[in-house]
Image (cartoon, helix red, strand yellow):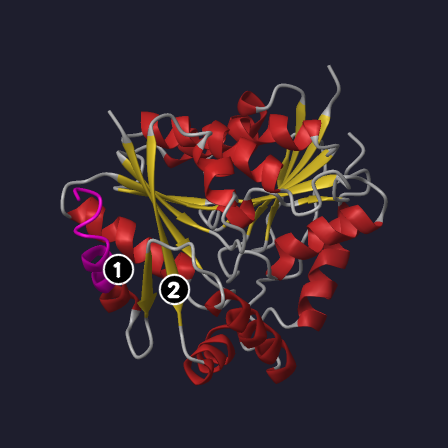
Amino acid sequence: MIPVPVLWLHDPTAGEGKSGIGWQLFTRSVEAGTPTAYIDLEFTGTLAPAAADQGRFRAKVLAALWPGYRDAGARAMVVFSALDVPDAATRCAEALPGAVVTVCRTDGIIGTDADVSMDAGGPAEEQDDDRVDEIVDVFLAAAKSWPVP
Amino acid sequence: MTTPVLWLNGPSGVGKTTVGREIVAALGRSGTPSALIDTDMLGLVRPSNPADPEHHRLKAAHLGALWPVYRAAGARCLVLAGEFEDAAYPKLYADRIPDATVTVCRLRLDETDHRSRILERNGKSVAWADRLVADGAQFERTDFADIVVDTGGLDPAASASRILAAAGGWPLS
């Protein structure tokens, strides 16, 4: 099975779906030559009333979308979530067989199943363009191997 | 059993997703579990496929894959937010949802309100706002919507109420 590098970004401060750090990580990955998909779990859809188990529901959303992106050529995926999903890496890996998940958090705590650790340098309170670039640089420097699993 | 689908169409910045969220929240509160899916978010892969440059086929396939997830979680009707200017697109997407009955609602604003809303919400440049307003003029020339709702001067909740009324009490019409 071909491994799927997934960068899961938890960023409670981001606004519109195509802005902020997640979008920049996506575009940087593409510019680096890796066909990449971007899934914004906040703006893809809404269910009302909300699903009782958000982690499980979001994992199903990922599982539904990844095959189409893979068939469209994607070889890596950036996932944005404003909601702090417990065990995000585990849930994601269960939904996507072969996924190698790196979890990035803008509060500076990074957990991963790919043995990467880094410090984002504090919260992204103001996501102006320079600040976003700076944080993305920190993320990518720390996750040296991403998107190569 | 049919699946009522309300498609909110219109130019960027007119408030499709914002109003869509209000609609599903209101329906959810009133006892109709509902889903909103933003079709513009279902085709974010780069580089693009030259054979599907706007990713409509990919997005339609993703809608077909995603709806069962929402359906299984309880949703009984679906609001779509997404931009299209060709009358053929609703069918392309709706064919992915079994027994869909689609109502297309075009949201509109006059140029002044549209420009103000873009600048207030996104903080984009005036040039960017002008481009989106010009896109809005293109939508004014389309004629395939089932209903057209002007949301000028309305907050999202009021816009949602106006849309549901204009759609004949959707989803129960």
User: Residue B120 at x, y = what percent?
Assistant: 46, 79
> In the rendered structure, which disc, 2 or 1, sits on the residue that comes first in sequence?
2
Residue at the farthest left position: B30
Judge whether residue B170 is colored magenta.
yes
Amino acid type at image mark 2: Leu
Amino acid type at image mark 1: Ile
Q: Secondary structure at mark 1?
A: helix
User: Residue B82 at x, y = what percent?
Assistant: 48, 52
Residue at the farthest right position: A33
Distance CA(mark 2)–CA(mark 1):
9 Å
Please say whether residue B158 is visible from this viewpoint. Answer: yes
In the displayed structure, A88 sits above or below A39; it is above
User: Depth check: A20 or B170 in front?
Assistant: B170
User: Depth check: A133 or B117 in front?
Assistant: B117
Q: Which residue is mark 1?
A: B163
User: Residue A77 at x, y = what percent?
Assistant: 67, 38
Residue drawn at (75%, 19%) of the image: A2
Please say whether residue B124 is visible from this viewpoint. Answer: no
In the displayed structure, B139 sits above or below A53; it is below
Q: Which portion, as a residue range, is magenta? A: B160-173
Q: Which mark is residue B153?
A: none
Q: Which residue is mark 2?
A: B107
User: Depth check: B148 or A80 in front?
Assistant: B148
Residue at the farthest top position: A1
Output the chain of dot 1: B
The quadrant the C terminus of chain B occupies is top left
